[in-house]
Amino acid sequence: MAISLIREFSQKQKIALTPQLKKSIDLLQLSRNEIIQKINHEIEENPFLEKSSDNSIETFEKIQSPSSDYQKDIVGNETLRDNLLNQLNDLNLNNNEDAIAKSIIDSLDESGALIDDISEIEVILNYKFSYTEIENVLKTIIQNLEPYGVGFRDIKETILIQLKKRGIDPKLFTIAQKIIDGNFVGNIYSIKEKLSESYNKDSINKSIELIKGCDLAPGLDFSNTIYVEPDLVVENSNQIRKVNFINEKFPEINIDHHLVKSVKQELKNKPNKKLSEKIKDAKWFLKAIKKRNETVLRVGEIICNKQFAFFEDELLEIKPLTSKEIAKQLRVHPSTVSRILRSKYIQTPRGIIPLKSLLISSVSKTRNVTPIQLMETIKLAIQNEKSKLSDQDIATLLNKRGYNLARRTISKYRLKMNIPSSRKR
């Protein structure tokens, strides 16, 4: 059988992050305070940019807000992100580790939680690094930074990180790990009873107290004075609720056309690549800021159009909505939506809340049901039961209505409401 070398051509789709696209993504994830600081920095660094209060000058189009009656809060000087990046500078990281670590930090929210899957970070890094490499940096570098507990993917992980860093007695750590990782059913007393078969009561109580002492959102305690300033506001306009971008205190910038014109004349005689790049950067930055604000507003509109009933004090009316659904409407990747939602706040009738708090997944694949709605349904089923309904009975009852839920799902949300099992009711 003859073997021959044949050249074959095939088309493949591949995401390529250009430098400008990477910078655009970086701008999207900045909070209001961070973007204002960025604008002020660019004005200082780039002579072709200037602040302006004259709307007649060509500027990025401000998204008008009919009212400026919103809560104004001062933002802390150093953010959690700044602090983590500063700690990276003190570590002897190679180029690969540094690139991965910075990308992971950009994927953390203000609580220190990792909001992007590692597979999404692979895409952001243009598949230059494997899933294993990224996860290794997360566990060995990011999760060793202060405040301890950041870089967590779920509540269990941040508790274990903090317990490890405390250097507690190995025996107590083992018990705590069993409590966290164990699939115990019932209240704290039944858990203690189960563990007492292998450990003494005093050790179990000490482990439980250590768990209680852990911070479930370690990033929020980074500073004693963490304040936020919203980008968006929900307002009434002619008895219609509308989402608007808050322009007050947001710097208005434009190109210094007179300087650009004079410099371009000089460049004809004496070409200067750096000056030409500065002019291009100024024009790009102007468009990027406008795009950032428009995108934040668009995401806010999509979310609030779905959740307006929630603002009318109808808590159970909050509807399932995921970043994938928003991404589909915006025609972007879900990881981009995650970045847009990072540190973005909206002023609502309920006060200032994070935009991402209005996103919630459905607990059912066949019906749009939020966890709160499911818990209310379970509670009603138990209240109206003629005979004691087990979790399987409730699951069967709801599945006849098209919920398509497993028994363990019913058990999970019943326990969240502190409702005992059918045997103990």
Image (cartoon, rainbow, N blue to C red):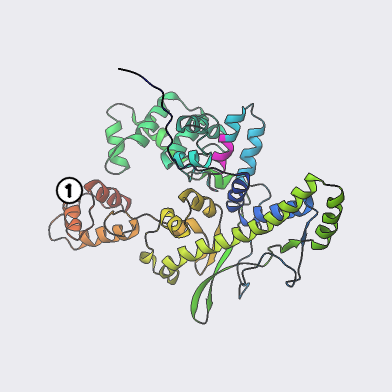
Q: Nearer the viewer, residue 166 or 357?
A: 357
Amino acid type, residue under disc 1 in the picture: Arg
Q: Nearer the viewer, residue 60 or 240?
A: 60
Kindly give the residue lying farthest to the top in the view shown.
1
Mark 1: secondary structure: loop
Judge from the rendering whether residue 423 lies leftward or rightward of residue 366; answer left or right: left
Query: Depth check: 293 or 143 in front?
Result: 293
Q: Is residue 40 magenta?
A: no
Q: Position of residue 128 (x, y in %)?
A: 52, 34
Please indicate, yes or no, whether residue 223 appears anywhere in the rendered image: no
Residue topped by disc 1: 423
Mark 1 nearby-residue class (10 Å; few <14, some 14–19, many ≥20): few
Please count the marks in the image.
1
From which residue to which does the magenta span run? 100-109
Residue 163 appears at what percent x and percent y? 47, 33
Q: Quadrant of residue 228?
A: bottom right
Residue at image x 51%, y 32%?
129
